[in-house]
Amino acid sequence: MKPWAWWRRSPAEITPLMALELAAICEEAGVPKGLISVLPGKGSVIGDAITKHPLVRRVSFTGGTTTGRHIAHIAADKMMPVSLELGGKSPTMVFEDADLDHAVNGVLYGIFSSSGESCIAGSRLFVARSLYEPFMDRLAEGAARLRVGDPADERTQMGPLISDRHRDSIESYVALGVSECASHGGGLRERLCEEIFGPVLVAMAFDDEDDLIAQANDSVYALAAGVWTRDYKRAWRFARAVQAGNVWINTYKQFSISTPFGGWRDSGLGREKGRLGILQYMEQKSVYWGMHEQPLPWAN
């Protein structure tokens, strides 16, 4: 087995159980022993050891942008390719002609599923001003009806956040946003720029489509975006104009294993899934085979 064919996974130190379960399923399915290893532990210890090891020739990382930059520095010293799927602050744009039932459910799913702990969470909502008030009323009603509870219960739509520390971090972001917006007279419609990684949605009304694109693209992140409209020409125009590696039209957080996934700028490097994702784990080679009757004339 070549070194680059091994698969070593270091799960997040506070969420190791799913990775261990995956390894057990792979072993039960007949995957050869040693092909897959799961190494739980502190990221700064286990992760660094894996990334810096001379026999590790490629790294794929999903996580925060700060850690991603650290891995990229190590990879640069080793001249090692990496795939980095990092943070996001994804915009969702709802136009006046959108199907309200679909848009409301899609926005709720985009920000509150997985308790908002998702890199592609639709955390920045832009709604056409003529639709803003009725849309926000329906959105608030829908959010209030979400079933919060034990994640092991199939009826639960939102479970707890991953840790007390992370919950406190999210609460501090909300408090800071309310304080800063109130001091500027902007209320909760003002934009929060940092990824909160939790069930927090910032909603704003828009009037001008050019300004909407400027605001949607005004972020260091560029991972995902959503467009809600019945106008297919507008949908196509905005899907092309928004700067994001993944754009959903009249849906959100739907995937196919056949399509590449990844982001631009601080949202990462490289792609996962699809043909492009497979090619990222391969080295290309060119072979030239001389068939000339005579030697190369230059040396004559």
Image (cartoon, grey):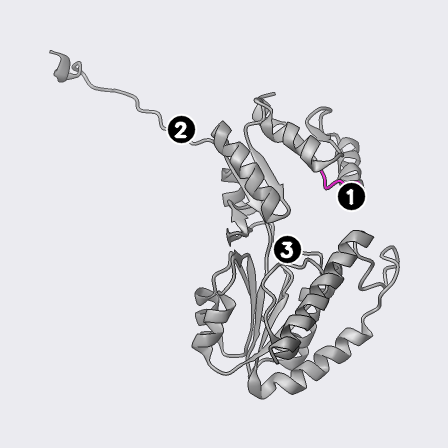
Query: Callout 2, which amino acid?
Result: Lys
Name the spot of residue 172 as percent of width and height, x first: 73, 62
Q: How many marks?
A: 3
Asked if the residue under mark 3 is in contact with the one under mark 2, i.e. CB atoms within 8 Å, the reply is no
Q: How far apart are marks 1 and 2 (CA)?
A: 41 Å
Quarter placement of the N terminus: top right
The foreground one among 188 and 27 is 188
Secondary structure of the residue carrying tag 3 is loop
1 or 2: tag closer to the N-terminus: 1
Task: Give neighbour class at mark 2: few <14, some 14-19, many 20+ (Cα, 10 Å).
Answer: few
The foreground one among 88 and 34 is 88
Q: Which residue lies furthest to the front in this view?
A: 183
Query: Callout 3, which amino acid?
Result: Cys
Who's the residue at 54% across and 47% down the image? 274
- In the rendered image, which residue does mark 2 sit on? 285
Task: Give neighbour class at mark 1: few <14, some 14-19, many 20+ (Cα, 10 Å).
Answer: few
Q: Residue 14 carries which label?
A: 1
Name the spot of residue 133 as percent of width and height, x first: 65, 86
Q: Distance between the residues labelled 2 and 3?
A: 35 Å
Task: Give neighbour class at mark 3: few <14, some 14-19, many 20+ (Cα, 10 Å).
Answer: many
Q: Bounds of the magenta span?
A: 11-16
Residue 74: in sight, yes or no?
Answer: yes
Quarter placement of the C terminus: top left
Q: Is the magenta stretch mostly helix, strand or loop?
A: loop
Who's the residue at 61% across and 80% down the image? 185
Is residue 80 found left or right of 295 in the rendered image? right
Name the spot of residue 162 as percent of width and height, x first: 79, 52
Who's the residue at 81% across and 75% down the image? 145
